[in-house]
Image: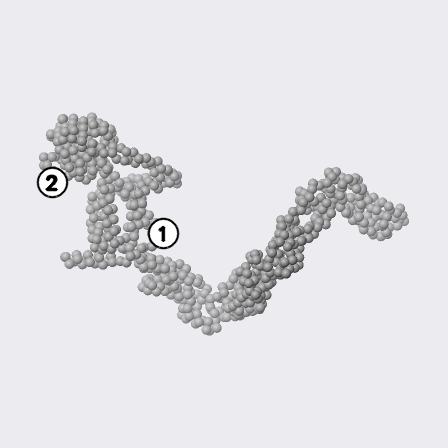
């Protein structure tokens, strides 16, 4: 039997030989730890204020000893604790069985009424706390106790009075009848009076009040207690052995007053001695009255429960080391032995996904050390089946014996003919991205290139492009030959780039010769030529949104320009003027001197004209309203068209009320010849009126 026990202990010691391992914590583990912390806090909260609370403190101390031994590797102590934990757990449950039963009953009785409002109120509740210094027992209570005990002793009335200390007596109070009354000698005498309902059992004094009566107390098992003392004295001593309470006992047989505390009994004492002992019980204590935020309420206990949950979870996980599964997502598939296909003049493409999820199953400590880079998936094309699929193989050199499964077992491959095509190369650049240089031209050493690949890919090619960016322009400017080597990019007909690994170019890189100019920012002077002299005469201001521009040219040309003068002709119709304002957008590059380049070729010039206040009027004429002056009486004058419009513009408000009769249109026929003549209609000038020109055709014929 002894050898078997020794072997069991040695086996246990060997079983906990371990390497130092810190388990990785995932989201599920965090949830599990929080649930454990909540359970621990629930137990602590419900056991607080009971005898089990003191026992729980002892358990915490023992657990701390076990934890230190575990961390330091004291394997013998760890094995002893692990072998005793079951028996110790059963003993604890037996000892605090009433408290556990009450805690579980409270769960069933508790009504769950959680709403968004209650959660919000709890989270927003503010602190309201203060600390008070109070006496365990007031002077008045002491006087009433002494007076009551003296009177009951004189009358030989048995009494058993317990004064609660730091250890709560809630379980004792629950065993009796709750009273919650002020301590008075008359109340105590009435309670312990013979043949009354409350006289049998103990009275508990809590927070300076009579909390309950007829309470049951545990009896002392001390064999040294005088045999002459009865059950009342043995119960009084028993409660002081298990708690820090103080007990007053009045003998029913002799009327003697006794005082018990910490398992010691002071028998047959007088009033002076009783007062002295009660003064020691009266020692003040600090009581914190608080109404805290739900998060900060019992915060030390919550933190301790969380730390305990983390420690217990870590110890259990490390000790049990369960078998777990871990998924490594999107592992790229490595293709080997591709020459089995390419040597036959064919090419291949992967038609299924190029990645796969790998599930690894092993012990937790092993998986915690596994990195995604340790896992690879291989497709051996030399093992291609007749259905053009190849079985995938997962490789984890660091875990050769682990269980591995793949989300996809095979990879599908398409085999095609290899074809070639010759395509033109286009050049694309973005000058605006380079503030220092301007790309005037780009010339390729070879304008075509041969692209080789699978027929299905070659058929989709839309263009081959050499893209020149800002860095390329800088590099070319610093190169005496202004040359660059750039890899062309292949795009499909939808404009999406084709993977360079799926095609082969006859020239991996092409030579591009760049013509690069320096740049310069100079003021721009703009002269606007307005053809409509009528509107030109009433312009108040001309505004431009651009005052300087960046130009590019060869250095000898660029040095000639400290500013740029630009003339822009502008034809304006009256209908385009809105609210005494006219705006037109002009493409500035169209009006630049031919030897200069505008760096920002898309730069738009906004011309804004502001006019003085003017009036306008539109009038309709017919040919009969036009007077023929200086005509020949032997001639006939026919005017066409028969009807026409004219606009009057000016600064005189009278224009608004002008009529055909007031402006008197006429034609000077002195210079007209036979046949059709194109002439302008003239008007008598009235005030500051400004008229637009109206051309008509006058046909001159002889009369008769």
Question: Does residue 495 show up?
Answer: no
Q: Position of residue 451 (x, y in %)?
A: 53, 68
Q: SS class of the residue under badge 2?
A: loop
Residue beneath disc 2: 223
Q: Which mark is residue 466?
A: none
Query: Which circle marks residue 27 in the picture?
Result: 1
Crowdedness near tag 1: few (<14), some (14–19) or many (≥20) residues, C-alpha within 10 Å: few
Quadrant of the rendered image containing residue 241: top left
* Colour treatment of the image: one colour
Residue at 70% across / 50% down in the picture? 529
Res 358 quadrant in image: bottom left
**Of 170 and 142, the residue lying toward us:** 142
The answer to which of marks 2 and 1 sits earlier in the sequence is 1
Residue 270 vs 663, above or below: the answer is: above
Mark 2 or mark 1, whichever is nearer to me: 2
Outermost residue toward the left? Answer: 228
State the residue in front, 112 or 444: 444
| Horizontal and vertical percent position of residue 45 | 28, 41
Q: Position of 413 compared to 212: left or right?
A: right
**In the rendered view, does 582 fall on the left or right side of 628?**
left
Q: Could you tell me how far apart the alpha carbons at marks 2 and 1 are, in whole angstroms?
A: 58 Å
Residue at x-position 12% and y-position 31%: 268
Residue 322 placed where, x, y %? 29, 56
Query: Taking the image as drawn, is residue 331 in sight?
Result: yes
Report how many numbered discs are placed on residues in the image: 2
Identify whether 133 is placed above or below 318.
above
Mark 2 closeness class: few <14, some 14–19, many ≥20 residues within 10 Å: few
SS of the residue under disc 1: helix
* Quadrant of the image containing the N terminus: bottom left
Image check: 2 left or right of 51? Answer: left
Q: Residue at x 36, y 52 (%)?
A: 27
Q: Which x, y percent locates residue 675?
A: 85, 52
């Amino acid at each position: 039997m002894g050898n078997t026990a020794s072997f069991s202990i040695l086996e246990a010691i060997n079983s906990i030989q371990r390497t130092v391992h810190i388990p990785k914590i995932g989201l599920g583990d965090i949830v599990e730890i929080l649930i454990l912390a909540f359970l621990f806090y629930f137990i602590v909260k419900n056991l607080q204020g009971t005898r089990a609370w003191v026992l729980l403190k002892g358990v915490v101390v023992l657990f701390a000893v076990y934890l230190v031994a575990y961390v330091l590797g004291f394997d013998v102590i760890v094995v002893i604790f692990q072998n005793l934990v079951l028996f110790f757990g059963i003993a604890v449950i037996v000892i605090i069985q009433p408290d556990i039963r009450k805690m579980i009953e409270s769960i069933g009785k508790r009504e769950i009424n959680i709403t968004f409002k209650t959660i919000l109120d709890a989270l927003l509740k503010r602190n309201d706390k203060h600390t008070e210094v109070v006496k365990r027992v007031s002077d008045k209570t002491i006087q009433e106790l002494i007076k009551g005990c003296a009177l009951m002793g004189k009358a030989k009335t048995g009494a058993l009075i317990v004064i609660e200390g730091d250890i709560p007596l809630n379980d004792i109070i629950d065993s009796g009848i709750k009273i919650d009354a002020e301590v008075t000698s008359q109340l105590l005498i009435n309670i312990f009076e013979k043949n009354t309902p409350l006289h049998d059992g103990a009275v508990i004094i809590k927070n300076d009040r009579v909390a309950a009566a007829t309470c049951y107390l545990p009896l002392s098992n001390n064999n040294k207690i005088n045999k002459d003392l009865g059950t009342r004295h043995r119960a009084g001593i028993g409660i002081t052995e298990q708690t820090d309470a103080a007990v007053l006992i009045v003998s029913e047989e002799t009327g003697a007053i006794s005082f018990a505390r910490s398992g010691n009994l002071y028998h047959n004492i007088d009033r002076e001695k009783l007062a002295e002992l009660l003064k020691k019980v009266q020692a003040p204590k600090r009581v914190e009255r608080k109404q805290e935020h739900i998060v900060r309420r019992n915060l030390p206990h919550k933190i301790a429960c969380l730390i305990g949950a983390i420690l217990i979870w870590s110890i259990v996980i490390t000790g049990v080391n369960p078998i777990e599964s871990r998924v490594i997502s999107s592992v790229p598939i490595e293709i080997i032995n591709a020459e089995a296909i390419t040597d036959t003049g064919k090419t291949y493409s992967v038609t299924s996904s190029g990645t796969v999820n790998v599930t690894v199953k092993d012990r937790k400590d092993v998986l915690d050390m596994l990195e995604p880079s340790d896992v690879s998936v291989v497709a051996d094309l030399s093992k291609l089946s007749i259905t053009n699929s190849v079985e995938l193989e997962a490789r984890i050199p660091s875990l050769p014996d682990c269980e591995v499964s793949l989300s996809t077992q095979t990879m599908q491959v398409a085999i095609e003919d290899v074809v070639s095509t010759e395509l033109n190369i286009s050049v694309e650049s973005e000058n605006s991205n380079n503030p220092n240089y301007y790309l005037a031209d780009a010339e390729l050493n070879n304008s075509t290139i041969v692209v080789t690949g699978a027929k299905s890919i070659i058929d989709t090619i839309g263009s081959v492009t050499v893209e020149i960016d800002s860095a390329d322009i800088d590099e070319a400017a610093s190169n005496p030959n202004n040359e660059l080597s750039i890899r062309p990019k292949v795009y499909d007909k939808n404009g999406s780039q084709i993977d360079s690994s799926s095609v082969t170019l006859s020239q991996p890189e092409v030579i591009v010769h760049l013509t690069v100019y320096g740049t310069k920012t100079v003021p721009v002077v703009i002269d606007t030529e307005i053809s409509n002299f009528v509107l030109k005469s009433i312009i108040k201001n001309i505004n431009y949104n651009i005052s300087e521009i960046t130009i590019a040219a060869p250095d000898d040309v660029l040095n000639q320009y400290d500013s740029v003068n630009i003339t822009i002709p502008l034809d304006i119709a009256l209908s385009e003027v809105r609210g005494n304002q006219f705006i037109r957008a002009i493409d500035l590059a169209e009006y630049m001197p031919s030897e200069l380049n505008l760096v920002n070729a898309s730069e738009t010039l906004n011309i804004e004209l502001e006019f003085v206040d003017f009036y306008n009027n539109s009038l309709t004429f017919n040919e009969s309203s036009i007077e023929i002056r200086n005509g020949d009486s032997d001639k006939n004058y026919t005017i066409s068209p028969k009807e026409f419009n004219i606009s009057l513009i000016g600064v005189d408000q009278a224009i608004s009320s002008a009529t055909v009769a007031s402006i008197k249109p006429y034609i000077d026929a002195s210079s007209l010849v036979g046949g059709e003549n194109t002439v302008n209609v003239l008007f008598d000038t009235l005030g500051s009126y400004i008229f637009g020109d109206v051309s008509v055709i006058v046909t001159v014929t002889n009369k008769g």
